[in-house]
Image: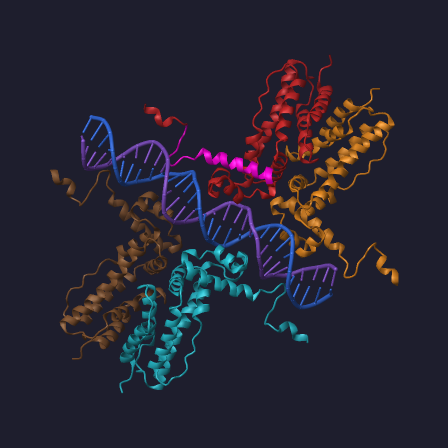
Chain colours: A brown, B cyan, C red, D orange, E blue, F purple
DNA sequence: TGATAAGCGAGACGGTACGTCTTGTCTTGGA
DNA sequence: TCCAAGACAAGACGTACCGTCTCGCTTATCA
């Protein structure tokens, strides 16, 4: 079969990367942070834990910051929000899904680490921008869909509203250092609902 | 004067610490972060910049985390909110004051650094807890005063509301990596005002 | 050739050590001591001078003491004494060779440093023992060869005699802080010759 | 009483130094070296052990090197050699006296430390010169007295002979790292006796 | 089938920062 | 002027980490 090599797009010559390595590294990052904290998140420690060589890590993520962001993203994952016909229900769904992720062990320190890593204009900057845009976009899309649908006021400042939806959970986790819960989600949904919802 | 030695409470023997050193170090931290970022915030660099020896720094702040938190706190400072007779006006006042601080150069990276530093169960943990409690307490007190005064609904969940007030500014700064402004403050005040204010 | 990998005995995996580093460090030690004295013999200074990183030094010599001993040994080198048929001539040869080494610049301070370094039961102890045994062994072997040959009295206390041969040069250098010369060698050879030589 | 202050020669104004401090410091130095080695000989450790402040030490000995030399000298002490009518007996007496001192605990490390300290052209240089001249002078005087008396050959090179007498004990102690004993003394006396003694 | 290219583990490399230790000075309050 | 206590500047210590490189080897594609 001539096309065998185009199974993956643009596969060059040479030995292909082992997927096993990629997964093992990300798992090792999460496990190390959960068990011993960010200070223990050493590239050497990751390499040992993942039973992988350091160059194998750097081949995939050029800096530690990229690795932290990649590991976080691998756990947060993309959320697809079905059209539930009601922006309040959709916000509730996405926030509760996020709460569940935030409550997994080590996620607090990992996310704090992401912010710390992103603070400097390092190599990981663009990866971080992509990540944060994706997260903010989810909420933004819900609001815009609500405007189109007619249950969100058309004069809503989507940017500010999205910030106010996303911020409390992360703040509770990182700044207040406590786990966010569904009670907080309820408060956020009610608040934002009153502020940008169309009266009925 | 017999009591001369009790001029300062509990002064021990030996040469007293020079206040000059304390100030110079905190200034150096802020300046370094503002000019070159968190990566340049080296203990050695701080010592050189402050024209101070490293042991003099470690005598005051046992870890780098403590130093970061102390430097941040020295700039954020305590806010005293006068009774303006209206919780919306009080929130607006405290948030605008905070926005002003957040917009000073380097404050974004410094605060991100604080979260990164606080993420690990290091020695700086208790200093951080005191700091964050103080910050959250400000907003909480405004809301409680509002309840007592009668312009905040008595069934308000003060904890959740305080989080929702404090979070957006910090999130905008640290996560979205943009400077919060009075427009965002206005949105927050309006939103929270609708949610917990007594209808009139 | 199947045996290619056994070219060097017992080569492990990983990047091999660069010989360049080893030589550069030893040269830097000798140069620093000669030019600025033992006080200037800082690990940092050695690293800078040798254009080598500090860890690269510590990988080879775990303590400063080991480094000092290694540097000294690299200059003193092993002496092979040919059988000259006369123990007096052999002693004269080995002592003059040693005098020549001792007279090179910085050697006085380096050897004083070796004794200072060896004074503590540090890690360098065994390296020092090996060194001193080798040095004492040279003289001892000359005397034993003399006994076998018949020009050294068979009742000679080789240990004491070896000490008395080796000591004056080092003492002149380190304790009296002057350079030993061939005149001193002559006196030592004559003295020991009279004491342990067979009358003819 | 006007003359009270001239009790000691050249006594200035102000509080006189306490002799207690001087003794306590020298004792502390010897004890620390004997118990824990030269590495533990810290100025702070000496101050704590002697129950004395650091400035009180530095007032007496400007550098650590001076202190080491002073402490050593306080133990080695001056030897007065009575005229025994025989230079061999006199050498035996002074060497055995010295062996006794060298065999006290910690003396090996202390003397090695003296050589290390003297290796650099520091402040302690002149104190060391005075010390070594005094030690070498003892032996030299014995030999000169022997020449005058007539039991030492008048063509003797006193300098070289003195070195050969003094060196072996110190070398045995510092270089070979073993305790010198009367057997070594006997060998030295016999050797030197044969070489410079007048035949009878 | 053999050459080429990229992957792999292992570990040394240069560089840099860490937090501690030591030296010798200085500043207190008090004798 | 001395004392004890202890902070100070300066700078070396030995370790840890980062991101790169070299080694000997393996696994794929391409010729």
Above or below A92: residue D193? above
Q: Quadrant of the N terminus of chain A?
A: top left
> In the rendering, at what x and y percent does residue A193 appear?
22, 75
Quarter assignment of residue B137: bottom left
Range of residues picked out in magenta: C9-35
> In the rendering, at what x and y percent does residue E8 appear?
30, 40
Indicate left or right for A66 with D145 as reference: left
Residue under the image location 59 percent in, 20 percent down: C81
Q: Decide which of A52, A157 is in the foreground and name it.
A: A157
Quarter assignment of residue D128: top right
Quarter assignment of residue A72: bottom left
Q: Is the magenta stretch mostly helix, strand or loop?
A: helix
Indicate left or right for A147 with B10 as reference: left
Observer able to see residue A182: no
> In the rendering, at what x and y percent does residue C46 appear?
53, 41
Indicate left or right for C64 with C3 as reference: right
Indicate left or right for B98 with C38 as reference: left
Count of number-bearing discs: 0
> In the rendering, at what x and y percent does residue D36 appear?
62, 45
Residue under the image location 79 percent in, 25 percent down: D156
Observer able to see residue B56: yes
Q: Decide which of C16, B149 is in the foreground and name it.
A: C16
Residue under the image location 52 percent in, 62 percent down: B60
Kindly give the residue lying farthest to the left in the view shown.
A1
Kindly give the residue lying farthest to the top in the view shown.
C200
Residue under the image location 50 percent in, 43 percent down: C48
Q: Quadrant of the C terminus of chain A?
A: bottom left
Q: Is residue C55 magenta?
A: no
């Amino acid at each position: 079969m001539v096309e065998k090599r185009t199974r993956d797009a643009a596969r060059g010559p040479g030995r292909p990367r082992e997927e096993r390595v990629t997964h093992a590294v990300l798992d090792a990052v999460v496990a190390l942070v959960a068990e011993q904290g960010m200070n223990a998140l050493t590239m050497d420690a990751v390499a040992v834990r993942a039973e992988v060589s350091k160059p194998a890590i750097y081949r995939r993520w050029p800096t530690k910051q990229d690795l932290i962001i990649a590991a976080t993203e691998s756990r947060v994952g993309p959320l697809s929000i079905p059209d539930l016909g009601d922006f309040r229900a959709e916000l509730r769904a996405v926030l509760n899904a996020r709460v569940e992720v935030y409550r997994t062990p080590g996620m607090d320190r990992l996310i704090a680490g992401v912010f710390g890593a992103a603070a400097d204009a390092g190599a990981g900057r663009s990866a971080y921008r992509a990540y944060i845009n994706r997260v903010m976009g989810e909420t933004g899309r819900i609001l815009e869909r609500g405007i189109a649908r007619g249950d969100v006021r058309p004069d809503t400042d989507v940017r500010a509203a999205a910030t106010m939806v996303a911020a409390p959970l992360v703040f509770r986790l990182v700044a207040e250092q406590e786990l966010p819960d569904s009670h907080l989600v309820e408060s956020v949904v009610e608040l934002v609902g009153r502020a940008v919802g169309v009266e009925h």
